[in-house]
Image (cartoon, rainbow, N blue to C red):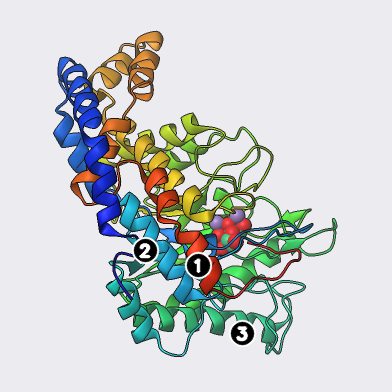
Amino acid sequence: MTGSPISIDLVSQSNASASEVLEDEYAALGRKLERRGIAIDAIKDRVKDFGVAVPSWGAGRGGTRFAKFPLAGEPTNIHEKLEDCAVIHQLGKSTPGVSPHFPWDCVDDYAGLREEAAAYDLVFDAVNSNTFQDQPDQVQTYATGSLSSTVEATRQQAIEHNIDCIEIGKKIGSKRLTVWVGDGTNFPGQQDLGRSLDRYIDATSHVYDALPADWTMMLEHKMFEPAFYSSVIADWGSSLMAAQELGDQCKCLVDLGHHAPNVNIEQIVARLHRAGKLGGFHFNDSKYGDDDLDSGSINPHQLFLVFNELIEAERNPREGFDPSYMIDQSHNVTDPIESMLSSAETIAGCFARAVIVDREALSAAQNDNDVMLAFRTLRAAYDTDVGPILAKAREEQGGAIDWLGVYRASKYRERKAQERKAVGLGAGIV
Ligand code: PSV
Ligand code: MN
Ligand code: MN
């Protein structure tokens, strides 16, 4: 095992040939930003401090209910997923955390798993529980719900699974639990909409009681799927109600794909922050529903506007404001390593563009009700090509200026195709 699955020489050779052009572009952008009163090195330092976790499940090829088309050399277990996450972090330098999902990532030795991650320069971020699928050895079925089930034994089983996730999380150094349930209905009348939420909150309170004092529990809402008529935690309103009833350590997680098309997600972010309940994000993009497309591939402007609210939140913090950032997307047609490198760059780019917004000018224009000036102030930041800042931040940390070129030249996936077990065909969820 090595902290650098890609040859360090390959990275340095590639950087050596790209650095002259980068210096030139960085200097030109530096002059441009200086004229706007912005020190480029300060923005670069913020980018260096920025991190977004990658999902262990995103390292494999995703699929739809129709088909999954496996990729030769894709990971088959958490050890191989960690190795792929190490490649992403080695080249991109902005993804130090890995968010695991249980029972998908179960192993016998969690202390060993933590060391394995550390040897790759990785840490574990939020642990995700799974009560949306039945497992072979499971006694109660989740077919009609989990934490909100009408069956007490099923709720109890879901509670125990979440507590098991906390126990695993303690061993691997996590401090957060993300709870997403697929509970809901497919028919009007199928369940009592009010009592389902009562049961959910009551069951989740037992999970909350098991949280260590320095942990956060994040409730993830989702409008629909797998339930197509109603979902118990369908929206930020239900999520906020539950988080407020559960207590200070419970917050809301916003997955960008879990809203109706055209919903103003940045406003949801601002509202949750105002309530002191903004816990974290799952970044992805969507065109129609929970498409789990690559972050910023469809609507990078929305991603920028979300970060704009986060920078505003930073300037106007509420108690306990420390959101966690994660990618949650499904790579059905690309190499997941390439997609996550690309997404991490897009996410860090939207963060950087939000950082360079002229906040004084923006609030002055807002106070004066100068609509066009306020809009153009925001747009000036969005229109700035921050690519040289991101590349320079990578270079200075030992990552690759041209991560795609280096990754392809390394033939990493081809090598893994020789070493790893083949994954079978079939329909598959992420
Ligand atoms: C559900 O759609 C979700 O966004 C949740 O975060 C799950 O944990 C993940 O996807 C599973 O793929
Ligand atoms: Mn999600
Ligand atoms: Mn989702």
Give x and y (percent) for residue 414: 51, 61
Give x and y (percent) for residue 12: 23, 49
Question: Is 242 located above or below residue 264 in the figure?
Answer: below
- Which quadrant would the N terminus be assigned to in this image? bottom left
Which of the marked residues, 2 or 3, is nearer the chain's N terminus?
Answer: 2
Give x and y (percent) for residue 408: 45, 50
Pick the residue in front: 130 or 270.
130
Alpha carbon of mark 2 to alpha carbon of mark 3: how far? 37 Å
Question: Is 368 located above or below residue 74 in the figure?
Answer: above
Alpha carbon of mark 2 to alpha carbon of mark 1: how far? 14 Å
Question: Is 393 located above or below residue 32 in the figure?
Answer: below
Label 2 element class: helix
Q: Which mark is residue 86?
A: 2
Identify residue for label 3: 156
Instruction: Kindly identify the amino acid type of the residue bearing the numbered disc 2.
Output: Ala
Q: How many marks?
A: 3
**Is residue 315 visible from the viewing direction of this image?**
no
Give x and y (percent) for residue 210: 42, 81
**Is residue 118 visible from the viewing direction of this image?**
yes
Q: Residues within 10 Å of mark 1 (few under 14, many from 20)?
A: some
Determine whether, in the image, residue 425 is placed left or right of residue 379: right
| Front: mark 3 or 1 | 1
Q: Tell me which image quadrant ligand 3 sits in.
A: bottom right
Instruction: Kindly identify the amino acid type of the residue bearing the numbered disc 1.
Output: Lys
Identify residue for label 1: 416
Which of the marked residues, 3 or 1, is nearer the chain's N terminus?
Answer: 3
Pick the residue in front: 13 or 379.
13
Which of the marked residues, 2 or 1, is nearer the chain's N terminus?
Answer: 2
Instruction: Kindly identify the amino acid type of the residue bearing the numbered disc 3.
Output: Gln
Q: Quadrant of residue 216?
A: bottom left
Label 3 element class: helix
Q: Quadrant of residue 183?
A: bottom right
